[in-house]
Image (cartoon, rainbow, N blue to C red):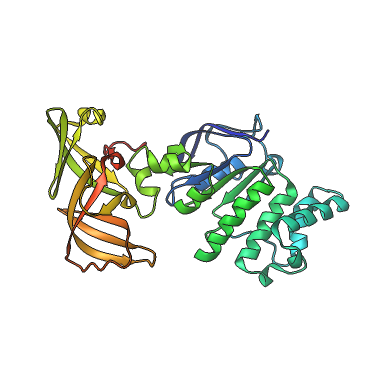
Amino acid sequence: MADIVLTNVHKAYGHVVAVKDINLAIRDREFVVLVGPSGCGKSTTLRMIAGLEEVSAGTIAIGGQIVNHLQPKDRDVAMVFQNYALYRHMSVRDNLAFGLRNRRVPAAEIAAAISRAARILSIEPLLDRRPHQLSGGQQQRVALGRCIVRNPKVFLFDEPLSNLDAQLRAQMRLELNELRLRVPTTSIFVTHDQTEAMTLGDRIVVMKDGVVQQVGTPLELYRKPANRFVASFIGSPSMNFINVDVKADGDHFALARQGWQFSLPGRRFPDLGSRVGRSVCVGVRPQHIRLGPPRNGNEIALQGTVMVTEQLGDEQLLAVRLGDSEIRIAGVDPDLSLSTGSKIEAAVAADHLHFFDELDEKH
């Protein structure tokens, strides 16, 4: 078994806390993505698992064994770095063999491992080339191959796609997903790109300021974000947020903001009862807003002014002024002509509303 368990893992550099009391259990053969903005502690967490950073407090266990005091070479993990870390003066074949030769693996086993990895990654024609003769995507495959030949308990990926262009990143995401089927190994993948997190992860760990904000499957994070930060970070375009005042109105709650007023039944939204008399943040994803008037009693009307249109070919994105707030609407017919300043009517189903308090985020 190669499950990974982090228990109250803490990392501080003097008075600066980089990672604060992380508790996380990763199952055998699970692919988990750590995602968050720069400086949130995701790479530091990965490096502590690899043994490249010491743990200030807490324990890390791999396969049931606490590894806090083990050297990186003794943890049986393989890491793919952002810059690939290939030896420029060696051929691809020698790069793949380097780690195995250091472990004094017999030559026949090394040759078999290289052949297998090259076949899995389709790099057989590249084995006699040097890294400078390879494209970015080919170098990435070689870096992955160096991990595969080791046959480790755990794969660790530290933003391995960030140096590639957008088209090649999309291709490599597909190849990584295919690789998971051929080489099912417990994996942790660090990225700041929520698209990579959503497409690759069995589960996603969202971090901010060294603190885990939420752990869940991609759909759980998209549909039920734990707080405003997770809601804004997961999903593209980002979720719209509007602060409204909540008042009790019989068996309904009245929510109002300049330019937007609506009511919700108390029996369907009981959590609003604790927010009566104060402000609450309403979140709604751009994909859940449609142009046109409400079609039934479950939909809420929006009326605004078009500020900017963004033509994407298969759809338009609209930036719309709603009172003193601004929202975005996605999925608009690309052939629909809307000029700046034109008035529009839109609607959103009440089921697609999210409610957040300003103090929801974990610190």
Question: In the rendered view, does 89 fall on the left or right side of 50?
Answer: right
- Residue 174's place in the image compared with 225, above or below, is below
Check the picture and name the quadrant holding the N terminus.
Answer: top right
- Seen as rendered, the residue at the extreme front is 295
Find residue 69 and report its horizontal and vertical position in percent: 64, 35
92 or 112, which is in the foreground?
A: 112
Residue 165 in sight here:
no
- Residue 299's place in the image compared with 7, above or below, is below
Find residue 224 and report its horizontal and vertical position in percent: 38, 38
328 or 212, which is in the foreground?
A: 328
Residue 234 in sight here:
yes
Check the picture and name the quadrant holding the C terminus.
Answer: top left
Residue at position x 77%, y 54% in the image: 116
- Residue 289's place in the image compared with 7, above or below, is below
Residue at position x 35%, y 48% in the image: 232
- Residue 245's place in the image compared with 90, above or below, is above
Residue at position x 65%, y 29% in the image: 64
Quarter-wise, where is residue 209 in the image?
A: top left
Find residue 294 and report its horizontal and vertical position in percent: 21, 48
Question: In the rendered view, does 21 fall on the left or right side of 69?
Answer: left
Quarter-wise, where is residue 318 in the image?
A: bottom left
